[in-house]
Amino acid sequence: MNSIWKQPADLQLLNRLGKDNMTAHVGIEFVEIGDDYLVARMPVDHRTTQPYGILHGGASVVLAETLGSVGAALCLHDMDKETTVGVEINANHLRSVRSGFVTGRAHPLRVGRRLHVWQIEIRDDQNHLVCVSRLTVMVVPRHR
């Protein structure tokens, strides 16, 4: 299979992009790049849990949107002329997690000229499905 990525897809680069923003704050780390998917993990700890001690649904959405948004950006032909913005995200929280890591895997359902739709599955350390999310991203002109 040929890669869908139009931009360089390198784990060190992707992890540097997350420095000094929400990605670093919640501990997201990109761990795998395939020809048509990205994988990142996030710890379940004091930064990502809710008061009842389980993974916060919003943290799952942060992981999902990070994966889908980065994937969409990597599909752009010219990042100097265009960028991506999320326009809708949904998430179904299927199972609680109290500790360890959750790992998200994002792959595109559609990569169009102006609209992308990404499916993200988040699993716990035992490979149980924790959350399923879908992100719609629009490609827009970059304003400088």
Image (cartoon, grey):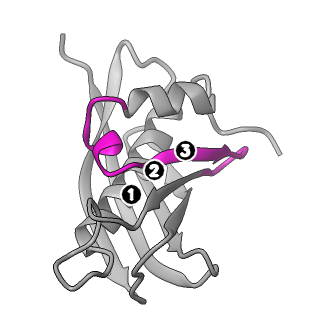
Q: Position of residue 29 (x, y in %)?
A: 50, 45
Front disc: 2 or 1: 1
Q: Position of residue 24 (x, y in %)?
A: 34, 40
Please identify the quarter of the rendering in which residue 44 is found.
bottom left
Q: Which residues are magenta?
A: 19-38
C-alpha gap between disc 1 and disc 3: 10 Å
3 relative position to 79: left or right: right
Q: Position of residue 12 (x, y in %)?
A: 58, 27
**29 in relation to 143, above or below:** below
Q: Earlier in the sequence, mark 1 or mark 3?
A: 3
> Which residue is more in the foreground, 95 or 144?
95
Q: Which residue is mark 3?
A: 30
Identify which residue is drawn at 42% across, 89% down. 95
Name the residue furthest bottom: 95
Identify which residue is drawn at 51% across, 56% down. 41
**103 in relation to 95, above or below:** above
Give neighbour class at mark 3: few <14, some 14-19, many 20+ (Cα, 10 Å).
many
